[in-house]
Image (cartoon, rainbow, N blue to C red):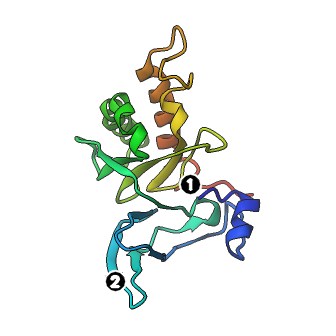
Amino acid sequence: SDLEPRGARRMMPIVNRPDVKVPWTVELDVPPGMPAYGNAPERSRTRLANGRDRVAFDPTAPLPSYLFAVAVGPFVEVPVPNAPRPTRFLLPADHAGKVAAAVAVLPEIIRAAEQFVGMPLPYPKLDFVGVPDFHGSAMENPGLVTFDVSALAPTGDGTMPPREPISQHVGIILAHEVAHLWFGDLATPRD
């Protein structure tokens, strides 16, 4: 999902303004057994008569339409231990081994943000979805943050730019997106 105004209107007829928020109740019909993810936790998966699976998600908190997100595909799930909410990275198989630094720093980033804001993470789960060829480095969709998989290896060959340790580079991206969960997602400016 990349639902900035033009992308959103290609997907569905909606009002796409930051100050217009509604809860989203989402169901996706996907190939049998295909993983599917949304802003909220999966509630159920039912096999349909046509052989496909219907995946239903819990209703979201009120969100502007540009923060609605879904992802479907054979992602490798990499859990983030010690995070205050269920947290994981969802990645294409060839990138699953590149998130060790992110997994190590993310719980500390979330806790620091919670302490700074004075309230817990306002969403029941937090997934980070690695997207190939994502235009832009990341998008702060609550519960389903999307990011360009090349952000984990910015030079393209798996090496880091000189003078920038991987934990600092990855930490900056993660901290930026985590901060948006309160500033921009929970508290959204008027258009």
Residue farthest top in this picture: 163
Instruction: Give amino acid for label 1.
Output: Ala
- What residue is drawn where x is 71% and y is 61%? 7
Q: Disc 2 versus disc 1: distance between alpha carbons?
A: 38 Å
Residue 103: horizontal and vertical position, in percent?
32, 35
Observer-nearest residue: 81 or 76?
A: 76
Residue 180: horizontal and vertical position, in percent?
53, 45
Q: Give the residue pinned by disc 1.
A: 187
Observer-nearest residue: 159 or 80?
A: 159
Rendered-image quadrant of the N terminus: bottom right
- What residue is drawn where x is 37% and y is 42%? 114
| Residue 120 seen | no
| Residue 70 seen | yes
Task: Please determine whether, in this image, residue 184 is positioned above or below residue 39.
Answer: above
Tell me if 59 is positioned left or right of 97 in this view.
Answer: right
Task: Please determine whether, in this image, residue 111 is positioned above or below residue 21.
Answer: above
Choose the circle earlier in sequence order: 2 or 1: 2
Q: Residues within 10 Å of mark 1 (few under 14, many from 20)?
A: few
Residue farthest front in this picture: 51
- What residue is drawn where x is 35% and y is 49%? 76
Secondary element at image label 2: strand
Instruction: Give amino acid for label 2.
Output: Arg
Tell me if 68 is positioned left or right of 96 in this view.
Answer: right
Residue farthest left in this picture: 82
Q: Give the residue pinned by disc 2.
A: 47
- What residue is drawn where x is 61% and y is 44%? 134
Q: Nearer the viewer, mark 2 or mark 1?
A: 2
Secondary element at image label 1: loop
Residue 18: horizontal and vertical position, in percent?
67, 60
State which quadrant residue 48 falls in. bottom left
Residue 177: horizontal and vertical position, in percent?
51, 41
Rendered-image quadrant of the C terminus: bottom right
